Image (spheres, rainbow, N blue to C red):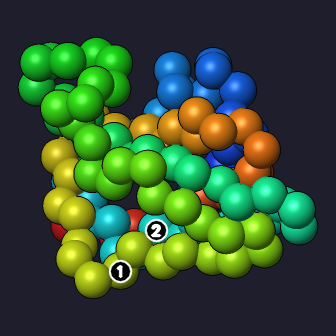
Amino acid sequence: MAITQTRIDGSAEQLGTAVFTATADTAVTTIHLCNISSAADATLNVYLLPSDGSTTVPTENNKLYNQLTVQATDTYIIDTEKLILANGDKIFIELPDSSGQIIATISTIGL
């Protein structure tokens, strides 16, 4: 099992960088989205891009979560369904509302 953590602060550049890239067939067991801001809610989008080359940047067609709000000092946990990723699949998290600050913790296990 592996843990990856990324801080997302709402800058436009964040969407250009994946928060997780599978380096082999991998199961994502949980994603924790912790808003470390004590004053502002965070609204975010989560994208999943396949490694098949059909797209290289996140688009509306790749969204898993749209306009998800995580209240200030709260954590949202995605753990109901497991994501099975192939080598090269990527997860992106966008924070278009820059007032919150998210720490994304992604727990995975190799298959």
- Name the residue that disc number 2 marks: 31
Which class describes the residues within 10 Å of circle 1: few (<14), some (14-19), or many (20+)? Answer: few
Quadrant including the C terminus: bottom left
Mark 1, secondary structure of its residue: loop
Task: Specify the amino acid type for callout 1.
Answer: Asp
Whether residue 22 is visible: no
Residue closest to the far right: 38
Task: Specify the amino acid type for callout 2.
Answer: Ile
Between discs 2 and 1, the one toward the N terminus: 2
Q: Position of residue 101 (x, y in %)?
A: 75, 51
In-image side of 25 versus 95 (left or right): left
Q: Are marks 2 and 1 in contact (CB under 8 Å)?
A: yes
Identify the residue shown where x is 63% and y is 19%: 13
Classify 66 as above or below 71: above
Which class describes the residues within 10 Å of circle 2: few (<14), some (14-19), or many (20+)? Answer: some
Q: How many marks?
A: 2
In-image side of 60 versus 36 (left or right): left
Q: Position of residue 69 (x, y in %)?
A: 54, 61
Mark 2, secondary structure of its residue: strand
Identify the residue shown where x is 77% and y is 44%: 99
Q: Nearer the viewer, residue 13 or 22?
A: 13
Whether residue 10 is visible: yes
How far separated are the C-alphas under marks 2 and 1?
7 Å
Classify 71 as above or below 22: below
Identify the residue shown where x is 22% and y is 77%: 81
Residue closest to the far bottom: 80
Residue 79: which numbered mark, if any?
1
